């Protein structure tokens, strides 16, 4: 603002041609005019870009304060955004085949998370989740033959294919809202010679699978995109056979039952919802209630893996800093998109760090008799 005033006064001081001085004072006036002209030119040279820079910075700040990709069910914003991420290839370049957070042990955190391979951390997450969810036990209980697993919200199928290699007798089906993800998942399976998988575009809230058709139903980081969390959980339970296991990993918000969100917290959550096309989040407690009361599952167990996964947010930023070229060569549209994603990654880190967000792990078993 000061610079703006300086520029304006410099303009005001430069005499206009109409008020040209008489011959007696002409040379003095000429000098005055030259000095003032120089001040004006200087102000123009430095102040105008500075003011423009200031305005641009404020505009960028304003743009970054609001999420840019809000959830819109009618427009299939989820499918559309994952289509774009898949087509661009940038997400796959940095995150690999698994589009979920990584797992870091205490020991790895002590050594420094940057020493761990970012993509390996994601594979480790899947391994931990499989062990925690009892996926191997569930398939053993089912006799190991004709075991069917449903991966709800499969991304480009990293987890689906990994399970398929670990459980060669099983058939794993992955569903997504993104046709590009389905095609990429299918192509990768073909490339890797994995035949006991299939991928389809299907809405988890309106699945046409028969009741009780899967031995394990798995949802890794898809719940956050669901506009109806109850339907998400109960639909999964509907297609689960009695005795089968249901296991979910999902970003959750703190339980606000006893302590309401402050205006600032609500604002932060609003950004996190609408930057990556999430309708809203719920708490881990809410999920556990849905598993037990609405879906009728037993032995429901919940946990918060925020500590084990939090390094992923900043690790994701660092892998981009260490290897910026795919983004650099992708052009200005991608620079802006990745810049925005970097801001969101940092805001996610902060929200998990201060307990506003939790990393929900929930599992349950379908009773043998209803
Ligand atoms: C963060 S990605 C997780 C991908 C995968 N689970 C993984 O771990 O690599 C979220 C996935 O959920 C899927 N998804 C979101 N809402 C869905 C819905 N209503 N029905 C089916 N899939 C959905 C998206 O299409 C996307 O594939």
Image (cartoon, rainbow, N blue to C red):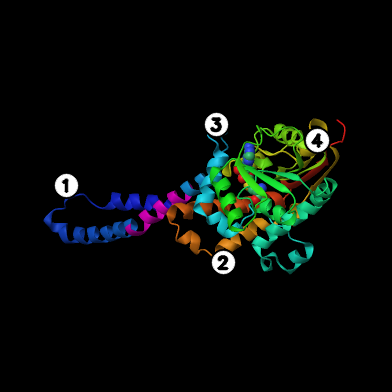
> Disc 1 to disc 3, how far (Cα)?
64 Å
Residue 97 x, y percent position in the rendering: 62, 55
Residue 34 falls in which quadrant of the image?
Answer: bottom left
Relative to residue 289, is residue 68 drawn left or right? left
> Disc 1 to disc 2, how far (Cα)?
61 Å
Note whether residue 267 is visible.
no
Which residue is found at the position 73% from the left and 59% from the top? 124
What residue is pinned by disc 2? 322
Q: Give the image quadrant in which the ligand numbered 1 is located.
A: top right
Q: Nearer the viewer, residue 197 or 103?
A: 197
| In this view, 123 is above or below 178 | below
What residue is pinned by disc 4? 289
Crowd band around label 3 with a 10 angstrom C-alpha radius: few (<14), some (14–19), many (20+): few
What residue is pinned by disc 3? 74
> Disc 3 to disc 4, how far (Cα)?
28 Å
Tell whether label 2 touches label 1 (CB within 8 Å).
no
Is the C terminus in the top left, top right, bottom left or bottom right quadrant? top right
> Disc 2 to disc 3, how far (Cα)?
38 Å
Q: Nearer the viewer, residue 163 or 8?
A: 163
Q: Is mark 1 within 8 Å of ligand 1?
A: no
């Amino acid at each position: 603002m000061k610079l703006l005033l300086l520029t304006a006064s410099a303009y005001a001081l430069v005499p206009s041609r109409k008020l040209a001085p008489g011959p007696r004072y002409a040379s003095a006036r000429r000098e005055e005019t030259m000095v003032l002209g120089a001040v004006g030119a200087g102000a123009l040279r430095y102040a105008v870009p500075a003011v423009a820079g200031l305005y641009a910075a404020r505009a960028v700040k304003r743009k970054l304060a609001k999420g840019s990709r809000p959830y819109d069910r009618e427009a299939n914003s989820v499918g559309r955004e994952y289509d774009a991420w898949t087509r661009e290839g940038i997400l796959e370049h940095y995150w690999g085949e698994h589009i979920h957070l990584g797992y870091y042990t205490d020991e790895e955190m002590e050594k420094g998370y940057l020493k761990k391979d970012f993509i390996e951390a994601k594979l480790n997450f899947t391994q931990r989740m499989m062990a925690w969810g009892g996926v191997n036990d569930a398939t053993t209980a089912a006799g190991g033959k004709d075991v069917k697993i449903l991966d709800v919200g499969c991304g480009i199928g990293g987890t689906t294919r990994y399970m398929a290699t670990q459980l060669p007798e099983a058939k794993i089906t992955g569903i997504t809202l993104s046709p590009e993800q389905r095609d990429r998942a299918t192509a990768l399976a073909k490339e890797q010679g994995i035949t006991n998988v299939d991928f389809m575009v299907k809405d988890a809230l309106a699945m046409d699978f028969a009741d009780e058709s899967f031995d394990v139903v798995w949802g890794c980081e898809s719940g956050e995109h669901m506009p109806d969390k109850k339907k998400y959980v109960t639909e999964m339970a509907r297609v689960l056979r009695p005795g089968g296991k249901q296991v979910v990993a999902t970003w959750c918000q703190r339980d606000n039952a006893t302590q309401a969100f402050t205006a600032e917290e609500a604002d932060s959550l609003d950004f996190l919802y609408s930057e990556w096309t999430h309708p809203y989040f719920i708490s881990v407690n809410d999920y556990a209630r849905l598993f037990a009361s609405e879906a009728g599952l037993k032995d429901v167990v919940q946990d918060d893996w925020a500590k084990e996964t939090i390094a992923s947010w900043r690790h994701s930023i660092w892998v981009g800093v260490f290897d910026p070229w795919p983004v650099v060569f992708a052009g200005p549209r991608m620079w802006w998109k990745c810049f925005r994603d970097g801001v969101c990654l940092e805001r996610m880190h902060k929200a998990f760090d201060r307990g506003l967000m939790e990393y929900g792990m929930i599992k349950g078993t379908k009773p043998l008799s209803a």
